[in-house]
Image (spheres, rainbow, N blue to C red):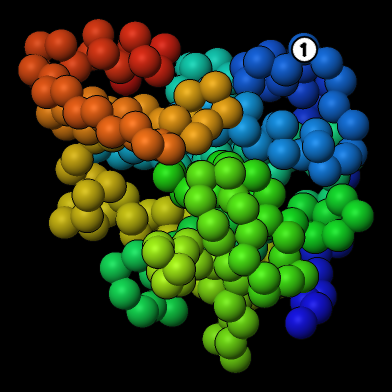
Amino acid sequence: MRLRPHYRGHVSELSEATVRSYLDRIGIDETPAVTFDWLARLQRAHLSTVPFENLDVVAGRRVFTDLDHSLAKILDRNRGGWCFELNGAFGALLEAIGFPVGRLGAAVLLDGPTTVIDHLTLEVMVDEPFLVDVGFGDSFSTPLRLNTTDEQDGGTGTFQFIASPQGTTMARLDDGVPVAQYRFKRVEHALKDFVAASDALQDDKTLHWSNKPFATRLIGGGPQRVTLLKDRLKHTGGDQYQETSIPQQDWDATLQTWFGMDRHA
């Protein structure tokens, strides 16, 4: 089943200096080209160097969906963020390089069925449309072809798109069984469209987003991953699983060692 992209081209909002700073931040010395190989390399580089983390939200510092906020946080403060920040900024970088990018709204299904749009993901065109995401934690690490329902290698596991009248579900296969991750429609959104979702996730103090600090990133492009939680450090991916208890007095030092971040920055 072939799906139709709905996004349109945008003029880049990033200056040449900002693009160079962003590429330096994710460890890219060369000038990327608009090819699938470069798109995959950029995604893996971002997932390895810019953590998926919620430290500002836990600390009660407001986060926003606009580019000025996200770029300053990632480039000037050397921090990470969640989907609205990471995919918002990465989408702008890809556009500046020359990739056509669509911003899609998705309903996260990890806790069961819902229609609430609470995730930003990206549709990126090369020779065909791909789903790209650097803001969903432990998920696929290479672009997924959108115009197929076949099983695909996502770099960290096997993934599949399942079409329905409600939208397209991105599922991860667990022993051959699809486990729904999120559902989206291929309709373009602006970053301002996610303000309400961002505010709601910050304001609900019952969610793990607001009261359980974490940071996670790939190691060297994956599949290995390091994750720092409130009281432990985990190494996962492939056949690896290692968990180490982290006393509170060592938490900041562990964050600096594995993520190069200061949560107070």
Horizontally, residue 30 falls left or right of residue 93, namely right
At a point 51% along the width and 51% down the height, the residue shown is 157
Horizontally, residue 74 falls left or right of residue 176, namely right
Quadrant where the C terminus sits is: top left
Question: Does residue 168 lie above or below 19 as drawn?
Answer: below
Residue 2 position in % (x across, y down): 80, 78
Q: Foreground: 73 or 136?
A: 136
Quadrant where the N terminus sits is: bottom right
> Based on the displayed image, in which of its 4 quarters is residue 240 positioned?
top left
At a point 62% along the width and 66% down the height, the residue shown is 151
Q: Foreground: 102 or 239?
A: 239
Mark 1 residue type: Asp
> Based on the displayed image, in which of its 4 quarters is residue 254 positioned?
top left
Residue 175 position in % (x across, y down): 40, 64
Horizontally, residue 27 falls left or right of residue 250, namely right
Residue 119 position in % (x across, y down): 49, 59
Question: Does residue 129 lie above or below 96 as drawn?
Answer: below
